[in-house]
Image: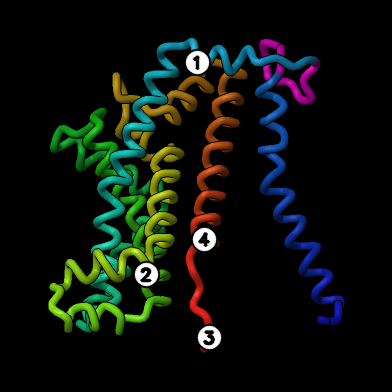
Amino acid sequence: MRQLTLGRILLGIVVAAILIFSILPVLVIIPVSFSDTRFMTFPPPGYSLRWYQSFINNPTWMDAARTSLLTACLTVLIATPLGVAASYALHNGRHWSLRYIRIGMMMPLIVPIIIVAVGVFFVYAKIGLLSTITGLVLANTMLGLPYVVTSVLAGLKGFDPAQEMVARSLGMNRLRAFMLVTLPQIKASVISGAIFAFIQALDETIVSLFVSGGENQTLTKRMFTTLRDEIDPTIAAISTLLTAASFALVMLTVLSKNKTPRKTAK
């Protein structure tokens, strides 16, 4: 049994304080979303579902929600196969340039998002992709690709490549060997990357502020523009729904990894 030292106790206190500070806004916004008052007040004087009904019954909000869901789903469909292919190449390649390619693919996580958004805006302004679903999907694919690559690379590091080599020695080509031997064993990592790409696309705000608009306005941009006009408790209800969806998807990721069969020592 590990002995509790002063350093460990202090570290535990610091970690707990950081977690509480991070989750505190969520603990505040959830009760506010059930408030029965016209304005955001905490704690709410009464509780009702009026703001969830306001969200569901408002065509503008629902159009924005459909745009966000469509963008997130299309992003996953594009980013996941691209990320898997890139991860496989990075993991198995031996060329010196691959390390720089990997750094380049991680740039959306390194560069401040506001700089990325401004750059995307000017490029889209020249090629006519502003306020389009295509532009939103391409931008979110760029932002979601690092999550897929990171997750799949982690899965490939725990996979024995000899199994794929055996399949190829028995007559399978590389693509078929990957699809039938490698992919089933790293599927938890692929699912995790796809889920995080979906969450990123669904919650993305900064890039959406620059490139979405008109009929293709995302839910997060609609929330931001509404906050400029008035503090509507409907935003608290939407925030709660987005948080619940993200939490459920993260839990799905954890469950998918826990169901992955582990290798047993012989």
Q: Amino acid at mark 4?
A: Lys
In this picture, is 62 found above or below 252? above
Contact between labelled residues 3 and 2, with CB atoms less than 8 Å apart: no
In this picture, is 176 found above or below 147? below
Q: Is residue 235 magenta?
A: no
Q: Secondary structure at mark 4?
A: loop
Q: Quadrant of residue 152?
A: bottom left
Q: Nearer the viewer, mark 2 or mark 4?
A: 4
**Disc on res. 153:** 2
* Crowdedness near tag 1: few (<14), some (14–19) or many (≥20) residues, C-alpha within 10 Å: some
Q: Is residue 166 visible?
A: yes
Residue in the picture at 70% in, 14% down: 48
Residue in the picture at 86% in, 77% down: 4
Q: Is residue 111 visible?
A: no
Circle 4 sits on which residue?
Answer: 259
Which is more N-terminal, label 4 or label 2? Answer: 2
Which is more N-terminal, label 3 or label 1? Answer: 1
- How far apart are labels 1 and 3 at the CA level? 53 Å
- How far apart are labels 4 and 3 at the CA level? 18 Å
Q: Amino acid at mark 1?
A: Ile
- How far apart are labels 2 and 4 at the CA level? 19 Å
> In the image, is 6 to the left or to the right of 136?
right
Which is more N-terminal, label 1 or label 2? Answer: 1
Say which of 57 and 264 sits in front. Answer: 264
Which is more N-terminal, label 4 or label 1? Answer: 1
**Disc on res. 56:** 1
> In the image, is 126 to the left or to the right of 41?
left
Give the x, y percent position of residue 259. 52, 61
Contact between labelled residues 4 and 1, with CB atoms less than 8 Å apart: no
